[in-house]
Image: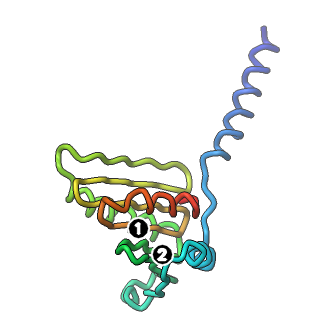
Amino acid sequence: MRIKKYFISILAITLLFTLTGCFSKEKINSKKFIDISKKEKLTIYEVTTQFKSYDNVKKVYAASNLRGWRITFFEFKNSDSAENIFNKKVEEFKKNKSKNDEDDKSGIRNYSIYELTTNNNYYYISRVDNTLLIVDADSTHKKEINSFIEKIKY
């Protein structure tokens, strides 16, 4: 009986450590964001100077297409700064939510995601470690945007 409890305890601990490794995401850097954006034929803009009043921001890039949607990628000096901005943007996006709109928030370990689709707009924000990806676009572009987000794995 004692051996069975010991075996189950070891199995549970092993399973716990195995699963927690599966619940983290690998972040990308600005270079990879730019490379994938160019591959997808998006126009890239460095917009870091627009955020120069924030001393915790390292780099900011925007990728947009001819149809009018834009994705902004932030690199912060630390994860706490990214998480702080993530939470502020989520609250800002939630102000646009009406009773019948769908939204979803998830996260574990090193990442968080919030997504909101309204009649007219699509909002998406994803934080991985010290990086942040923000989308505020017309809801008609949701499918294309999600395709891009899948490619960068955010």
Image marks 1 and 2: residues in contact by CB distance under 8 Å: yes
> Is 45 located above or below residue 93 in the figure?
below
Q: Residues within 10 Å of mark 1 (few under 14, many from 20)?
A: some
**Residue at (62% x, 77% y) in the render:** 35
**Residue at (60% x, 72% y) in the render:** 36
Q: Residue furthest top?
A: 1
Secondary structure at numbered mark 2: strand
- Residue nearest the observer in this picture, 38 or 59: 38
Residue 41 percent coordinates (x, y)? 54, 76
Closer to the observer: label 1 or label 2?
A: 1
Residue 20 percent coordinates (x, y)? 64, 43
Taking the image as shown, residue 78 lies to the left or right of residue 18, namely left
Residue named by callout 2: 74
**Residue at (44% x, 47% y) in the render:** 106
Q: Quadrant of residue 122?
A: bottom left
Amino acid, disc 1:
Ile
Colouring style: rainbow
Amino acid, disc 2:
Phe
Q: Residue furthest front?
A: 66
Taking the image as shown, residue 19 lies to the left or right of residue 95, namely right
Residue named by callout 1: 134
Q: Quadrant of residue 140?
A: bottom left
